[in-house]
Amino acid sequence: MNFLHNDLGYLDGNQTVEVTLDKAANVKLMDTANFSRYRAGGGHDYYGGRVTRSPFRVAVPRGGHWHIAIDLGGYAGSVRAGVRVLE
């Protein structure tokens, strides 16, 4: 599966991640364990989902190491995205 990946590093639970997309895509905020399962094609838990309006903001639920994955759900094409952490 093709996807964009941003390793956000350690984030506190009181931060927000903002993702800007050029088209609709799946945006998934995951901890390291879930990102590993996602990358391997297995079941995984995440915050976010199908995003059709940009920018999209998702709250970091707790302190830890976080990743953002952006994909088109198996459809052909590409997506451009910007990711930033808001304080």
Image (tube, rainbow, N blue to C red):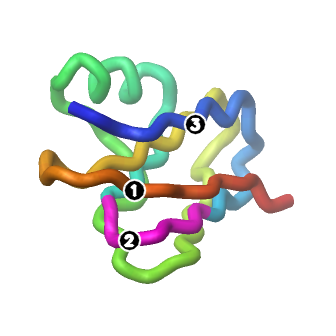
Q: Amino acid at mark 1?
A: Val
Q: Secondary structure at mark 3?
A: strand
- Tags 1 and 3 touching, CB below 8 Å: no
The residue wearing badge 1 is 79
Task: Please give the name of the residue rendered at 35% of the width and 78% of the height, measured from the top-left corner.
Answer: 52
Q: Nearer the viewer, residue 85 or 1?
A: 1
The stretch drawn in magenta includes residue 20: yes
Measuring from the top left, give residue 34's x and y in whole percent: 37, 28
Inter-mark Cα distance, 2 to 3 = 18 Å
| Circle number at residue 57 | none
Residue range of the region highlighted in magenta in the rendering: 19-25
Task: Please give the name of the residue rendered at 18% of the width and 24% of the height, measured from the top-left corner.
Answer: 41
Measuring from the top left, give residue 17's x and y in whole percent: 65, 57
- Tags 2 and 1 touching, CB below 8 Å: yes
The residue wearing badge 2 is 23
Inter-mark Cα distance, 2 to 1 = 6 Å
Q: Please tell me how crowded label 1 is: few (under 14), some (14-19), or many (20+) other residues with Cα within 10 Å.
A: some
Q: Is residue 38 visible?
A: yes
